[in-house]
Image: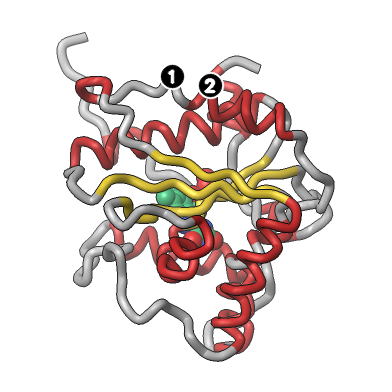
Amino acid sequence: MDVFEALAARRTCRAFKPSPVPRATVEAILTAAGRAPSGGNLQPWRVWALAGEDLAALKGKVLGRIAAGQLTDGDYEYLIYPPQLKEPYLTRQFRNGEQLYGAMNIARDDAAGRMEQFRRNFELFGAPVGIFLAIDRTMDRPQWADLGMYLQSLLLAATARGLSTAALESWSLQHRTVREHLAMPADLMLFCAVALGLPDEADPVNAIRAERAPLDEVAVLRGF
Ligand SMILES: Cc1cc2nc3c(=O)[nH]c(=O)nc-3n(C[C@H](O)[C@H](O)[C@H](O)COP(=O)(O)O)c2cc1C
């Protein structure tokens, strides 16, 4: 699989099979992702990969909080979206929700159905591996861009190994619980979780192919 094929094949998987992923595969993916470039070669990413009972224990804590109605840890590490999302981003976000809930037959006014889909984020959609990405608080926008490159490298490396992934910033809403479980130093902040495993292709949620804006909406090519 070349990079173009991996880019085309990768998509957010929201239903996984429980089949375990060998530790050596996870090590290979994280090692490959570590080749991501970063300004000044700071490599400003920190990573925890959990499986088995350790992951089950973390999920149990987070799901327990959600069952108790504590959808967040009470504060935010960062704002997931700008408070005033403007066009064309607002429409893209709306379409994303439409596609997701449409694939799952969850109606717009079905608050319980939407809540259940939110909750599944914290089951990692059944994935056997959860990878948690963090960054030092002193880092600014350039290093966050580096972290994004690390994340995409990780997703593509997993794809090339025949695995599926979901990057989940929803996990930042439970950052305190994650921090405590991982004994994450206070100078780091949680960016997201990544669910990793084999996809359950029978689940209709995995049939979603999220739209993309046409090239001329996002790019200008001149002088060719
Ligand atoms: C950093 C990041 C965080 C994301 N967080 C979530 C999330 O919490 N829950 C979710 O269902 N999808 C999440 N997504 C998936 C996006 O919705 C998805 O990437 C987008 O709709 C494009 O679809 P695709 O990945 O299938 O191409 C996240 C994606 C990224 C890159």
Asked whether disc 1 touches disc 2, contact meaning CB atoms under 8 Å apart, the reply is: yes
Residue 42 point in image, percent of width and height: 26, 27
Residue 167, which numbered label? none
Residue 15 position by quadrant: bottom right
Q: Please, is residue 201 above or below residue 68 in the view? A: above
Residue 8 point in image, percent of width and height: 57, 31
Q: Please, is residue 135 above or below residue 90 in the view? A: above
Residue 197 point in image, percent of width and height: 72, 44
Residue 35, which numbered label? 1
Q: What amino acid type should be assigned to the residue bearing mark 2?
A: Ala
Closer to the camera in the image, 115 or 201: 115
Q: Is residue 25 visible?
A: yes
Residue labelled with disc 2: 32
Distance from Cα at disc 1 to Cα at disc 2:
6 Å
**What's the residue at 67%, 65% (across, down)?**
57
**What's the residue at 23%, 51% (across, down)?**
137
Q: Please, is residue 219 above or below residue 15 in the view? A: above
Closer to the camera in the image, 208 or 78: 78
Quadrant placement of the N terminus: top right
Q: What amino acid type should be assigned to the residue bearing mark 1?
A: Arg
